[in-house]
Image (cartoon, helix red, strand yellow):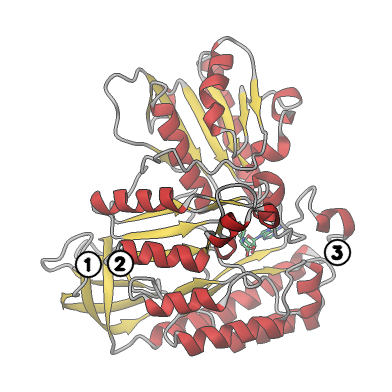
């Protein structure tokens, strides 16, 4: 199964419960990774206090914000097309203001204002608390920009509003930025250095979600395994922390345990893991707590040692296999998924075969696969030629997608005949008479609705499957209910 970013969510306009006294209308669209969608909830929360209600109707908007993604060139092209559309609307509504948020804002900075003249405001991912001042600037007729990256901003003190939620699962951000410096990746430049959020504020958010009826959370960060709280500040400055700060620090395994113990009936997921930072204590914590879901998203990007080195991934193929073996030994039923890039500079057919053989070894449950897209400012762009022809990238991509589909089907077949706990998220896309939910391994399951409802934990006997979906029948509530 090819798992791609949910296109139906891309660019969706988010709205929340309106406050009566709020007089201005905000239209906010989000693109890219889950972190961006989560950030838009923070932005909406900040602006609700500034008198803005959200709207899903562009024509009603006083302020249009686009939360943008720079990860691949195509993502940026999509946003540019939307900005052209907003500009056309602006010509008929001159009082409407347009702002760019997120990674493209950080990457292109004031270029949006000076050369392209298509927006009024440019705000980077660490500057959302400055939005009230920036909006005042544009209200007074000046352009506004704040793209300063922060050492300690985690928005831990902003209670995000849940936009377009199913009321069952929510994302809780735990780290911001990334220090890994993979040579293909723009994230360290657009989201800054890595810092972790205070565990106390994470627990408060989780408790609040539980009290409001949520049943599942995903702890979110570019590299969650690298989580390290020692009183605030950048991960890279941990060496300079006091002995007391070091002794009372909390790592990712510690955070997982804190959250799992605080809410034993809440499902806990996390994303994304990086192989070089994932430690055995995380896998052991997953095995120890029933409520931590048995699923790890573990991007590898390539199966070739030479390409892994050129990507600065800081682990070898053999070390990755060792990690996979440990996961399988400690949690035999754990699902594992990958991110893969085809056509990184200098990738040969032999490198590509190494990727295919790595996939054969792991037999991933899911995969997110991409053709290499050169990103300005990255080390790969500065030092290497983007020398693999588009047709070769695409052919290799379709080969790995084909192998992934085969493995996804193999993995869904392993669930056949078993009775598994499914958390009901909503109605199946294909049938109004069926619920859709997920098992602990994150595989989608559908079953007849009967008397069950959204948010129930239901034991479902799996009778059939496709490469993407388990099909079953309910046999009763799970003891979690
Ligand atoms: N932090 C995670 C990691 O690297 O392990 C994932 C971060 S990124 C938001 C999600 C995925 O986008 C990456 O895992 C990678 O597969 C893909 N990606 C990043 N930069 C890319 C590029 N220049 N071209 C193609 N795909 C890219």
Location of residue 431 by image quarter: bottom left
Which residue position is annotated with label 2? 437
Q: CA distance from mark 2 to mark 1?
A: 10 Å
Q: Residue at x 48, y 46 (%)?
A: 37
Above or below residue 86? Residue 428 is below
Q: Residue at x 44, y 75 (%)?
A: 285
**Left of 380 or right of it: where is 162?**
left
Residue 439 on image: x %, y %: 33, 73
Q: CA distance from mark 2 to mark 3?
A: 43 Å
Q: Residue at x 57, y 36 (%)?
A: 82
Residue 221 on image: x %, y %: 54, 56
**Left of 464 or right of it: where is 176?**
right
| Mark closer to the chain start, 2 or 3 | 3
In the image, which is nearer the foreground, mark 2 or mark 1?
2
In the image, 27 versus 194, the foreground residue is 194
Residue 438 in sight in this render: yes
Q: CA distance from mark 3 to mark 1?
A: 48 Å
Determine whether the residue tagged by mark 3 lies in a helix, strand or loop: loop
In the image, 331 versus 93, the foreground residue is 331
Location of residue 356 by image quarter: bottom right
Count residues near mark 2 (Cα–Cα under 10 Å), then give few for <14, some for 14-19, many for 20+: many
Residue 136 on image: x %, y %: 54, 15
Count residues near mark 3 (Cα–Cα under 10 Å), then give few for <14, some for 14-19, many for 20+: few
Which residue position is annotated with label 3? 387
Determine whether the residue tagged by mark 1 lies in a helix, strand or loop: strand
Circle number at residue 434: 1
Determine whether the residue tagged by mark 2 lies in a helix, strand or loop: strand
| Mark closer to the chain start, 3 or 1 | 3
Q: Name the quarter showing ligand 1.
A: bottom right
């Amino acid at each position: 199964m090819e798992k791609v970013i949910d296109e139906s969510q891309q660019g969706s306009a988010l709205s929340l419960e309106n406050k009566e006294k709020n007089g201005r209308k905000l239209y906010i669209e989000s693109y890219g990774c889950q972190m961006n969608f989560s950030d838009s909830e923070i932005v909406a929360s900040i602006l609700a206090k500034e008198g803005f209600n959200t709207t899903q109707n562009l024509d009603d908007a006083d302020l249009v914000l686009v939360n943008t993604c720079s990860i691949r060139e195509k993502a940026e092209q999509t946003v540019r097309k939307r900005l052209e559309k907003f500009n056309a609307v602006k010509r008929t509504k001159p009082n409407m203001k347009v702002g760019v948020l997120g990674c493209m804002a950080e990457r292109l900075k004031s270029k949006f204002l000076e050369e392209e003249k298509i927006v009024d405001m440019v705000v980077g991912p660490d500057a959302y608390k400055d939005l009230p001042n920036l909006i005042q600037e544009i209200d007074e007729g000046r352009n506004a920009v704040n793209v300063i990256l922060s050492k300690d901003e985690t928005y831990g003190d902003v209670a995000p509003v849940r936009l377009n939620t199913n009321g069952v699962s929510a994302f809780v951000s735990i780290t911001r930025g990334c220090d890994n410096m993979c040579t293909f990746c723009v994230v360290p430049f657009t989201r800054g250095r890595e810092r972790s959020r205070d565990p106390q504020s994470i627990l408060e958010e989780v408790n609040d979600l539980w009290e409001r009826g949520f049943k599942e959370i995903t702890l979110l960060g570019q590299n969650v395994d690298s989580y390290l709280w020692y009183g605030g500040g950048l991960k890279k400055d941990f060496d300079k922390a006091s002995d007391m700060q070091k002794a009372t620090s909390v790592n990712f395994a510690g955070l997982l345990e804190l959250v799992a113990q605080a809410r034993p009936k809440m499902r806990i997921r996390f994303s994304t893991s990086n192989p070089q930072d994932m430690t055995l204590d995380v896998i052991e914590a997953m095995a120890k707590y029933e409520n931590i879901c048995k699923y790890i998203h573990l991007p590898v990007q390539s199966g070739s040692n030479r390409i892994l080195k050129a990507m600065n991934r800081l682990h070898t193929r053999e070390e990755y296999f060792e990690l996979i073996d440990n996961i399988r030994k400690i949690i035999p039923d754990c699902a594992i998924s990958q991110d893969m890039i085809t056509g990184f500079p200098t990738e040969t057919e032999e490198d590509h075969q190494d990727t295919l053989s790595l996939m054969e070894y792991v037999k991933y449950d899911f995969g997110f696969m991409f053709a290499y897209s050169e990103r300005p400012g990255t080390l790969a762009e500065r030092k290497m030629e983007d020398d693999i022809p588009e047709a070769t990238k695409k052919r290799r991509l379709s080969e790995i997608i084909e192998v992934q589909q085969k493995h996804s089907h193999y993995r869904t077949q392993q669930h056949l005949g078993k009775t598994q706990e499914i958390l009901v998220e909503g109605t199946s896309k294909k049938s109004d008479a069926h619920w859709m939910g997920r098992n602990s391994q994150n595989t989608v399951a559908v079953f007849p609705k009967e008397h069950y409802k959204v948010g129930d934990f239901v034991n479902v006997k799996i009778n059939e499957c496709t490469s993407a979906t388990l099909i079953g029948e309910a046999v009763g509530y799970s003891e979690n209910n």
